[in-house]
Amino acid sequence: MVVLAASICTKGGKAVISRQFRDMSRARIESLLASFPKLIPTGTQHTSVETADVRYVYQPLEDLYILLITNKASNILQDIETLHLFARVVSDLCRSADQREILKNAFELLGAFDEIVSLGYREQVNLMQVRSILEMESHEEKIQEIIARNKEAEAKEELKRRAKQLEMQRREQQRRAAAGGPSGGGYLGGGVSGYAPVPQREYTPPAPLRNASPAPSSLRAPAFKGSGMKLGGKRTQQSALLDALGGEALLSEDMSAPGTPAVSHTPELAIPSVPKNERGSVPTVQAESVHVVVKEFLNLEISREGGLNQLELRGDMNLQISDSTLARVKLALAPAPASYGPELQFKQHPNVAKFASNRDRVIALKDPSRSFPVGQPLAVLKWRYSGKDETYVPLSINCWPTPSNDGTCDVNIEYELEADHVALHDVVISIPLPDGSYPTVSSHSGEWALNPSSHSLDWSIPLINADERSGSLEFSVGGDDTGVFFPVKVSFVGEGSVAGVHLASVTQVDGGDEVTYSEDATVVVENYTVV
């Protein structure tokens, strides 16, 4: 088949949009379209008409016609199938088949036409593939955007911290200048060189303050030290700042004013230290002589309309042996769940043998005479999955905002555990709120609180497992824009393996005796959003 052009025209033959796939002048295509309505027979159900040179394959589209202009040697059955695909693409991209809507989406329509037909020949694509090509989403680009936003946020926090340090220095300089000219001049770099150092030492106004108020000074010094220890890595910067302010800074009554920003700044800097405990409330596992640590990292994005935009799952298994007599062992993995496909890719340590096809998955050294290292962990296995298989989604989220006639919006959000073999601890579902509006919660499971830093409603559920697998929250808030409530962000710490990777048994290479082992499996969320 050779398709010369694909067009949408009015019933009078005027072109709305047209894409030529072979070299044709504008006057030629306009002439063909203008003569088309005169060739349509009346009282018949045919969808094709021929002239001496070309064939028209057409389909009514409300007040318009969508048609293919082909040569007479083209396969008419394939042309009709191609025409139906063109019509479905138009219906998918346009809300209505009127001339204004088609002109509004002309760029997307012409791009879709080029994906269906190339140089006059039909491409082997369907509607879903055309839609995916037009979206042109890139997971790597999204990751780079997230990294860039994080760097920008870190730079802003650093600027705020430096601005507060400079403000503290400025206030201390003003306080010293107000205390006395000689002392202030000496502090600002010794610009007044005519004063002898001895009179400056005799003039010591801070001495009465040290005697008159020992309690405040003694209380204020531990406050600064406590703040420094709480901030961890910032201690050296605070020490340098205190050295610049002088030894009397901690002992002066006037230091209370600049000291306030430093204390108030402590919670802001202390926030990043919270995720250090990645386990959250996941119970600890008592390690045996053979201890296996399984850790998975989850990145996924769910569409608010349903379906999965992107999912990436990475995992690794570390083997720790503390008894040298148990260094020669082999680990048998449990069979993979039947619902999981072959897309899960495994990668073994270079010294570990590959999985044999159509046999049990066993982790053992290539050389049976060698032993696993003792006293240090060894990453024996890694796995990865990237795709759109909803089987790997551990928790489904459904957020349903409904605008009301009184200028408010009723929001219903619910969750359901999809992976029964994983228990989710410390679950927090964060829903953005319209600016200046506060919610009225009518019913909820778990606990909820307002997050002033992001102006969002944080819904907290301590534990989601197979026994308590679902819950819902309903609230109303001012505003009628449903897009404000997205993206919904989810965080949790999982107990188990989303991919279903866990041990079935551990046996010794010599003799095959079973060995007592312990296994610690957790799931860490890197990004979990509903957009």
Image (cartoon, helix red, strand yellow):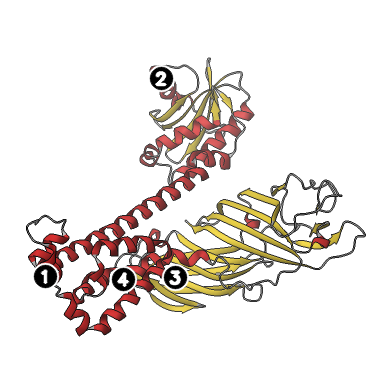
Q: Residue at x 47, y 43 (%)?
A: 141
Please identify the residue farthest to the top as the structure is shown.
Answer: 52
Q: The residue under label 3 is which amino acid type?
A: Asp
Q: Earlier in the sequence, mark 3 or mark 4?
A: 4
Q: Give percent across and percent down for residue 373.
A: 75, 55
Mark number for residue 179?
A: 1
Q: Up-down: is 56 above or below 385? A: above
The residue under label 3 is 458
Query: How far is disc 2 from disc 1 in space, using C-alphas?
Result: 94 Å
Q: The residue under label 2 is which amino acid type?
A: Ser
Q: Are the residues at dot 4 and dot 1 in contact (C-beta closer than 8 Å)?
A: no
Q: Secondary structure at mark 1?
A: helix
Nearer the observer: mark 3 or 1; the answer is: 1
Q: Is residue 404 visible?
A: no
Mark number for residue 31?
A: 2
Please identify the residue farthest to the right as the structure is shown.
Answer: 511
Nearer the observer: mark 3 or 2; the answer is: 3
In the image, taking residue 111 as reference, residue 190 lies left or right, namely left
Q: Nearer the viewer, residue 519 or 495?
A: 519
The residue under label 4 is 264
How many residues crowd around disc 1 within 10 Å: few (fewer than 14), some, or many (20 or more)? few
Q: Residue at x 19, y 84 (%)?
A: 212
Mark number for residue 209?
A: none
Q: Earlier in the sequence, mark 3 or mark 1?
A: 1
Q: Secondary structure at mark 4?
A: helix
Q: Earlier in the sequence, mark 2 or mark 1?
A: 2
In the image, taking residue 250 as reference, residue 1 lies left or right, namely right
Q: Secondary structure at mark 2?
A: helix
How many residues crowd around disc 3 within 10 Å: few (fewer than 14), some, or many (20 or more)? many
How many residues crowd around disc 4 within 10 Å: few (fewer than 14), some, or many (20 or more)? few
Q: The residue under label 4 is which amino acid type?
A: Ser
